[in-house]
Structure formats: structure tokens, C-alpha cells
Image (spheres, rainbow, N blue to C red):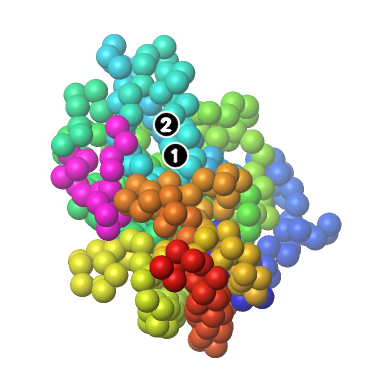
Amino acid sequence: MIYLDYAATTPLDPRVFEAMLPYLRPDGVFANPASTHAAGFKARAAVERARAQVAALIGAEPGEIVWTSGATESNNLAIKGALEFRGSATSNFLHIITSRTEHKCVLDTCRHLEAHGISGRAVRVTYLKPSKLGVVTSEDVLAALTPETLLVSLMWVNNEIGVVQNIERLAPLLRERGVLLHVDAAQAAGKLPIDLQRTPVDLLSLSAHKVYGPKGIGALFVRRRPRARLNPQMHGGGHEQGMRSGTLATHQIIGMGAAFAAAKADLETDAARIGGLRDLLWSRLQLLPRIHRNGGDENGTAAIAIAPHLLNVSFEGVEGESLRASLPELAVSSGSACSSATAEPSYVLRALGRDDEMANASLRFSIGRSTTASEIERAAALVIQQVQWLRELSPLWAA
């Protein structure tokens, strides 16, 4: 099988696997990092090294990294925690701004808050509609601000179409207005340069398994100066500066640290090679007529940045389920793996203006470190062959 679903998850980097082994062996470093004895101190030191490795990739301080179980928990902690803390200082309703193309865990969190409120107050959410290229501009966000706006939550890189939002421009504008900015960076970390010393994001969510690390571990960047304050969503022993209680999973944390260290070392070379493979795939697929690149400009002429590892394409004249079923050799998806339990067409593509038929007849290709040029050539040939075959079977295409 040719694996082209790296946006869903990545395999463990061999360097990560080797780094984790001493913390998995029965005779290895297994003590609780919170324990106050020599074995606990040793585990704690390893956890703090990993915290520094994660911080280094995004230009943060180690003390600004809070361990979580993944980006979903980080997003929940950031949004709910910030509103609970800041909402207690106002008697008005609370207002969030986000976009229609955010990850499900952000959208579902916002809908939960709309339905149930927080701290006894109503929550209103503005869901910004992106342009047909997939962009939410800083002007769109600023126009939606109200005196009650406490938080803006936008993803840095869209997980389905790869469009890069201009967080560097938006962040200082919100800082000037005293509005917190939360960024889901699960698809940005390790793919794009991020420097939080220069870009005043307040809260930023990270995931290990999108960066060749283990599943079940993530982190939330919580800025210290000026301090972004959160109410915890898990209560217990007061771990992680009181923001996220629970015994730390040392082996997973070590894996995330090693993965982020490798991503920092390989960032430029990975981006250049993977971006080249993505462009090769798109050039080959364009041998088919009437296909559409989702996100950005199909001809690459618009000044819209696209993350190097993602390509989303809709194919006219085919039924989506039939297309995916006809490609058993390819591990590709129609969108986010977190939305795959539903039979609905991608809400991200519909927000861009694709109708249900076109949104359903789409494939998301995501490329990674292990992808080769020969795999790209083979994948393109298979897709072209199957699309042509399905179109020949379709009376609508013939008409």
C-alpha cells in the first residue's frame, strides 16, 4: 500500500522509537516524575528535557509547555479554560470568533458552549466563512469583534486543504485589542517555521502523532508574558502548574520531545522535499480534465500559502465512494479522519463553495518523510486510471 494519509497520523520516526525505549523497558526509567526520590527525579529530568525540545521548535520557553493527551484536549483546555477564567470578570455574554473550517474538536467545543454556556453566562460564537480559496483574513476577524469578544480560535494550517492562515499578521492586531488568540497548530508544527517570540499568540495546541511521534500525547503552549490564564478542565494533583492534573506519561512525553527535536533539525529539508513531491503529484493529476484543487489557487498564482504536505482535489464526473473503493492500493482520505464516522461530505469543502457532489468526490493526499517519487508517480497513475474508468461508466459524464 502507498501511504498518503500523513495528515491523519504519521509513523514513529526511528529516532523517536529509540528515544522511547529506555522508558518502556521493565528495568528502565519507569518512576513517576512527580515522586520525590532519585528514580522520580530522573524521570522528571527527562520530562523537562522533552519540554525544552518541544518549546524549541516553536520559539517558546519550556515553562510555557503544558502536557496534554493530544491536540483535542489542548483545544478544549484552551477554549473552555480561557472563557471560564476571563468570563468571571464580566456580566455580559461571552463571545468567541472562529471559522467554519476549523477542526471538529474546536467546532464541537464551541457548539457545546453555545448550548450550555459557561460560568452561568451565555456564549455566542461567530463562525466566519472563508473565501473560496480557504482564507479567513485579519480584516474578517477584526470586523467580527465586539466588546464582549474574549477569544479568537483559528487553525494555522487547515487539516484538509492545507491553507495557511496569516497568524503572524493577525496576532499583534488582537494583542493591541486585548483579545486572546488561540491557534490549533497540529498541522503546522514541524511543517512551517513558528516563532512565538515574534508572533504574540496566547495559546497554541500541539500534537505528537502528526510529527512522527506517539499517539496519546500533545501539549498546549500557554504564554507567560503577558500571562494567558486558564481554569483547569481536569482536577486532581495539581500537575502541570495546576492546569492539567494527572500522572505524566513519561515514555510518550519523551517521544514527543524527540519528535519535535527531529522536526526542528529536518524542517527545511523536509519542507522542500515534501513540497516538491506534492507539486509533482498535482502536475501529474492535471492530465485529467475537469479536476479542481481545493484551497488556494489552482494555478498557483494567488498569494495564498499552502502547507507543503497537503493536496486536496475534487474530480468531476465520479461518485466519491466509488472512487475511494476503486483505489485499494492507496491510503488516502476524503477529509479529516476525525470526521470519517459520518457519511456527510466534507464541511470544509462545502464552506469553500463546493456542492455536496463535488465535496464528496474529493481526495486528500498528505505526504510525509517516507514518501518517494516513485510512489507519487504510481499513485497519480492509479487515480488517473480509475477516474477515467468511472467516467466511462457514467452516463452523466458521457452526456
Q: Which span of residues is magenta-colored?
A: 126-142
Is 139 covered by the magenta stretch? yes
Residues at discs 1 and 2 in contact (Cβ within 8 Å): yes
Q: Amino acid at mark 1?
A: Val
Relative to 116, does residue 308 appear above or below in the rendering?
Answer: below
In the rendered image, which residue does mark 1 sit on? 106
* Dot label at residue 24: none
**Quarter that holds the C terminus:** bottom left
Q: Quadrant of residue 93?
A: top left
Q: Amino acid at mark 2?
A: Cys
Tell me residue 246's x, y (percent).
64, 36
The reply to whether residue 261 is in sight is: no
Q: Which residue occupies 40% across, 82% down?
A: 287
Tell me residue 233's x, y (percent).
53, 28
**Quarter that holds the N terminus:** bottom right
Tell me residue 18's x, y (percent).
68, 70
